[in-house]
Image (spheres, rainbow, N blue to C red):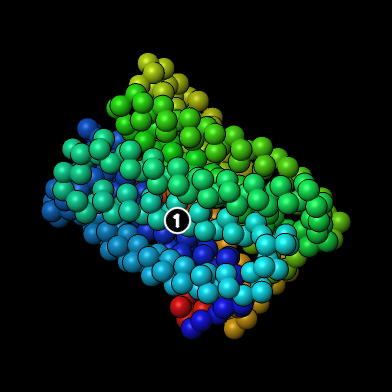
């Protein structure tokens, strides 16, 4: 199936969603499998736990199946979207896109390719024995990858922003949604990528480059978020939320997750290499604040889309919209940050005990959202027949 001029860069969100779901299942291994000597669960800790034959073995086995399955779908959709994009670039529709508000949707490319680096990192961690022994040699390559996707993110963003400032041709009549925040989503994804070597490397230079890169892209993301939230809500209050772009009201959820994890990682990085003791209580306050904002936007977005009939039109019916894949990222992000809240906000502060009944009960609402997200993903995947 070749879409050519009917293609939209927003189709890349299908690959992004699959990658996010793959990473989401790694959260079970990350927080449930003991890994005392490393900051993340790796093959060397996962396999012994898998072979024990207890309840954790079951959790590990289904997590590994879904990590690999969704990683496969991520790469399959990435290849499909990339091929479609190169054909789309040769059409007039692409030239029209570059002179409209929708030019910002090109940010889905670096956004998705940054997710690809994260998916590769997760696959390496769970499938390659002894990886952590050579991880310090891999961090420079990871930084090169994030520098590359960061460069293209900035290139697309500055081309778009400079065009608007020079020509002043931003169409406010078509901005009654938060789709413009896809640029902030991409920048936040690059920031959280940089924060990984910033948190985990024992080499001060690699650590510092990672933290600087994370702060650079996170600062730009926060600055733009203030601008675009203000403009977007002003237009929505004046004209109402556009139906097709209604999922954009949830885009703040993955942005908050990415920025939240970025600053958690930076905190750990500063503690490891800069002799800056981490205040555990600040993690409870910080993760609680992020989760609170996500719940507020989650409930608001659901109420609005339910009343507008979005789910009936774009999920349950045969009508297609590439933007509908934007529903997957918030579900993934809410689950992922929920795991961070339970483990770093609550268990880390001994508010609840790890592996206690309360610990698992608190996971239930987040797991429910993860399951609903998977169901929505496959409904959309079937509809688009990739």
Q: Is residue 272 left or right of residue 307?
A: left
Task: Name the one closer to the observer, 272 or 95.
Answer: 95
Task: Name the one closer to the observer, 242 or 215.
Answer: 215
The quadrant holding residue 171 is bottom right
How far across and down, in percent of the image, does residue 321 sit? 62, 73
Q: Is residue 361 left or right of residue 166?
A: left
Task: Tell me the residue at 38%/50% (across/down).
Answer: 118
How far across and down, in percent of the image, does residue 160 sit? 68, 52
Task: Tell me the residue at 36%/36% (across/down).
Answer: 197
Can residue 225 be seen at all in this image of the molecule? yes
Seen in the picture, residue 317 relative to 51 is either above or below; the reply is: below
Seen in the picture, residue 199 relative to 363 is either above or below; the reply is: above
Residue under label 1 = 113
Task: Tell me the residue at 36%/54% (across/down).
Answer: 119
Q: Secondary structure at mark 1?
A: helix
Q: Is residue 11 left or right of residue 202?
A: right
How far across and down, in percent of the image, does residue 133 sit? 18, 38
């Amino acid at each position: 199936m070749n879409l050519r001029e009917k293609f939209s860069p927003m189709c890349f969100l299908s690959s992004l969603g699959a990658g996010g779901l793959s990473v989401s299942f790694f959260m079970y291994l990350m927080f449930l499998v003991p890994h005392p000597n490393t900051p993340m669960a790796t093959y060397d800790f996962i396999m012994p736990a898998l072979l024990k034959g207890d309840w954790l073995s079951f959790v590990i086995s289904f997590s590994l199946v879904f990590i690999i399955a969704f990683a496969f779908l991520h790469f399959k959709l990435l290849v499909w979207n990339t091929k479609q994009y190169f054909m789309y670039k040769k059409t007039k529709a692409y030239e029209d896109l570059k002179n409209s508000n929708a030019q910002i949707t090109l940010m889905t490319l670096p956004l998705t390719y940054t997710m690809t680096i994260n998916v590769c990192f997760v696959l390496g961690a769970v499938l390659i024995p002894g990886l952590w022994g050579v991880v310090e040699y891999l961090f420079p390559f990871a930084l090169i990858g994030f520098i590359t996707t960061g460069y293209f993110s900035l290139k697309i963003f500055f081309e778009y922003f400079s065009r608007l400032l020079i020509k002043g041709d931003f169409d406010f009549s078509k901005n009654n949604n938060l789709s413009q925040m896809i640029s902030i989503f991409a920048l936040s994804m690059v920031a959280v990528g940089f924060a990984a070597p910033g948190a985990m490397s024992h080499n001060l230079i690699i650590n510092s480059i990672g933290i600087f890169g994370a702060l650079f892209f996170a600062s730009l993301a926060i600055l733009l978020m203030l601008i675009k939230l203000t403009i977007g809500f002003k237009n929505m209050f004046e004209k109402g939320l556009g139906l097709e772009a209604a999922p954009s009201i949830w885009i703040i959820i993955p942005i908050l997750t990415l920025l939240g994890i970025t600053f958690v990682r930076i905190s750990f990085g500063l503690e490891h290499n800069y002799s800056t003791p981490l205040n555990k209580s600040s993690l409870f306050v910080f993760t609680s604040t992020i989760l609170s904002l996500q719940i507020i936007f989650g409930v608001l977005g659901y109420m609005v889309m339910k009343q507008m009939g979005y789910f009936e039109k774009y999920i349950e019916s045969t009508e297609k919209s590439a933007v509908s894949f934007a529903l997957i990222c918030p579900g993934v992000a809410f689950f992922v940050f929920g795991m961070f809240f339970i483990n770093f906000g609550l268990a880390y502060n001994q508010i609840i005990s790890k592996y206690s009944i309360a610990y698992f009960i608190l996971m239930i609402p987040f797991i429910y959202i993860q399951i609903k997200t998977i169901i929505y993903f496959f409904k959309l995947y079937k509809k688009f027949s990739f």
